[in-house]
């Protein structure tokens, strides 16, 4: 009897990944490999295609709400848990690769440290990154987490965290869940208020970073004359 066309397919895909990684793979093939471990038998290639067709890209599949994933025929609890686990693990992995004592001299270096805190987040969150007088990393602390469209910055919390870590410099950071990375007038105003509040404490606010979908905007670098006029995108490849 002739072998089925998919005989040995899973092993071939796994072997190719082990040898070459996923460079050059289309999104559906990466999803297919992931689904092997949630759906132990059968052809999951059509399901991988359906996920990409419905949500548009690999990152959007991984960011999709569980209830939206459940609407795709063939998706179940195991598959959804696995897909939601990927960005969670990635964020923890990148977070743990950076630690106290790392030198932060540039906005890009600060962005590399802060970006993992926003991976996969569906809420707007605010963090402060604290540095000592030699610009060594002291830690990153969450100040607040809001709903899908708003997250208030508590000046008192920012001051408390900076003082607790004996920071001399800090970066403020938050994410936009709207998909628009442009700093809003409220973002610029918040920057000015927090900067003025921290200055008497001997803490210098270096910059305010806005994250969205893997991109980052520096409010300080976006200025033409003064903070907040114009903007300059900084993409992950530049970070």
Image (spheres, grey):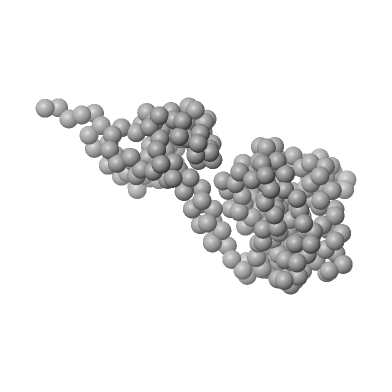
Q: Can residue 12 be seen in this view?
A: no
Q: In the rendered view, does 61 fall on the left or right side of 18? A: right
The image quadrant of residue 204 is bottom right
Could you tell me residue 168's position as x and y percent? 77, 69
Q: Which residue is drawn at 49% across and 39% down?
A: 66
| Pick the front one: 109 or 33 | 33
Q: In the rendered view, does 67 fall on the left or right side of 149? A: left
Q: Residue at x 48, y 45 (%)?
A: 84
Q: In which quarter of the image is the N terminus?
A: top left
* Count of numbered tags: 0
Work out which residue is located at the far left of the displayed protein and give it.
Answer: 1
On screen, 66 above or below 99? Answer: above
The image quadrant of residue 109 is bottom right
Q: Which residue is drawn at 87% across and 48% down?
A: 226
Could you tell me residue 2's position as x and y percent? 14, 27
Could you tell me residue 197's position as x and y percent? 85, 61
Could you tell me residue 179's position as x and y percent? 66, 37
On screen, 47 above or below 117? Answer: above
Q: Residue at x 82, y 42 (%)?
A: 185
| Pick the front one: 209 or 155 | 155
Q: Can residue 78 be seen in this view?
A: yes
| Pick the front one: 87 or 11 | 87
């Amino acid at each position: 009897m002739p072998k089925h066309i998919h005989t040995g397919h899973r092993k071939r895909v796994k072997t190719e990944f082990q040898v070459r990684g996923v460079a050059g793979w289309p999104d559906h093939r990466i999803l297919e490999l992931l689904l092997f471990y949630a759906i132990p038998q059968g052809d999951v290639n059509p399901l991988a295609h359906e996920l990409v067709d419905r949500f548009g890209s690999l990152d959007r599949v991984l960011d999709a709400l569980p209830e939206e994933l459940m609407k795709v025929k063939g998706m179940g609890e195991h598959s959804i848990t696995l897909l939601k686990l990927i960005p969670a693990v990635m964020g923890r992995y990148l977070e743990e690769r950076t630690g106290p004592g790392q030198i932060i001299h540039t906005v890009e270096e600060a962005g590399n440290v802060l970006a993992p805190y926003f991976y996969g987040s569906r809420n707007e969150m605010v963090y402060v990154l604290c540095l000592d007088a030699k610009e060594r990393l002291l830690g990153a602390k969450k100040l607040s987490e809001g709903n899908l469209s708003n997250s208030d910055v508590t000046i008192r919390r920012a001051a408390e965290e900076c003082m607790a870590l004996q920071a001399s410099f800090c970066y403020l950071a938050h994410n936009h869940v709207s998909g628009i990375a442009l700093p809003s007038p409220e973002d610029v105003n918040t920057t000015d208020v927090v900067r003025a509040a921290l200055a008497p404490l001997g803490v210098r606010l270096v910059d305010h970073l806005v994250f969205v979908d893997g991109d980052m905007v520096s409010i300080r670098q976006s200025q033409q004359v003064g903070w907040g006029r114009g903007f300059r995108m900084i993409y992950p490849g530049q970070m």
